[in-house]
Image (cartoon, rainbow, N blue to C red):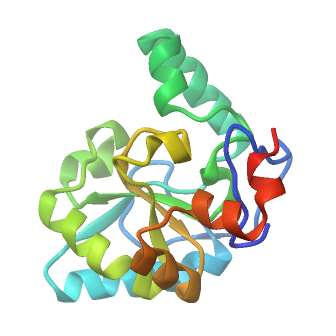
Amino acid sequence: GQIWSLVSDKHTISLDYAPSLSTTTLPHAPEADKVGTRTEKPLESLFAAAQADGIRLMLSSAYRSAKDQQTTYDSLLELNGRDYVHEYVAAPGASEHQTGLAYDLATITHGCELDANECSLDAGAITWLRGHAADYGFIERYPSGKQSITGVAGEHWHYRYVGVPLANALKAASMTLDEFVQQVAPGYASNN
C-alpha cells in the first residue's frame, strides 16, 4: 500500500490486505491499539507536539481489518439505517482504516478510554490539527464542504497519513487527496 493510495467506495482494496502493524503506546479507545508501522513514529511526534501546546490527543479508531469494518457496518446499518450508513460508514474494503494509514483522533477523556462511541475532538484540538498535522505528514481527509469531491460527509476527526511533502502541499493548496489524485492520474481517480 502506497502512502498516496486512494481508498474509497470507488477504489476498494482487497479484503485480505493487511499492513505491517504495531501495537501503540499512545492513549487509545478500546480496539484502537493497532497502528500501521510506518505511521507509528509520525503519530508519536504529532501527539507529542500537540501535548507541548496543551492539546491532549488519543486515538478513537486506528487500524481496522475488513472483518472489523464489516461488523461495524452491519451494526450501524441495523441501528441507523441505510441512508446513514451510506453517508458515514465505509463498506469493507473501502475504508482507509484498513490501510493502517488512517486514524480517528479524539481529545483525551475517561469516557473515550472506555468506549469509542464516547470520543470527540474539542474545538481547540480541531484548530490545532488543521494548523499542524501536515508538518507530521497527516491531512484532514474529509473536510467539510468537500463532500461532492470526497464522497464522505465532513469528518474533522479523521486524519490520513500521506507523508510530509504531500501533506504540506495539499494544505497549502486547500486540496483533498482525491483532487490531487485526479490531477496526477485522472484515469485512476474517475475509475469505477
Horizontal arrangement in the rendering, residue 192 relative to residue 132 (left or right): right
- Relative image position of residue 155 (x, y in whole percent): 38, 47
Residue drawn at (69%, 46%) of the image: 65
Q: Residue at x 38, y 77 (%)?
A: 133
In-image side of 189 versus 16 (left or right): left
Q: Quadrant of the N terminus?
A: bottom right
Frontmost residue, 191 versus 78 = 191
Q: In this picture, is 99 found above or below 23? A: above
Residue 147 at x, y percent in the picture: 45, 41
In the rendered view, would you say 172 is above or below 31?
A: below
Q: Is residue 176 above or below residue 65?
A: below
**Where in the figure is residue 79, as x and y percent of width and height?**
43, 12
Instruction: Identify the image quadrant of residue 165.
Output: bottom right
Residue occupying the point 47% across, 32% down: 88
Q: Observer-nearest residue: 77 or 44?
A: 77
Residue at x 57%, y 81% (from the top left corner): 166
Nearest the viewer among 82 and 121 is 82
Residue 171 in percent (x, y) is at: 42, 76
Q: Is residue 137 visible?
A: no
Residue 107 seen in render? yes
Rendered position, 159 above or below 50 = above
Residue 25 is left or right of residue 52, and the answer is: right
The answer to which image quadrant residue 151 occupies is top right
For the C terminus, the image quarter is top right
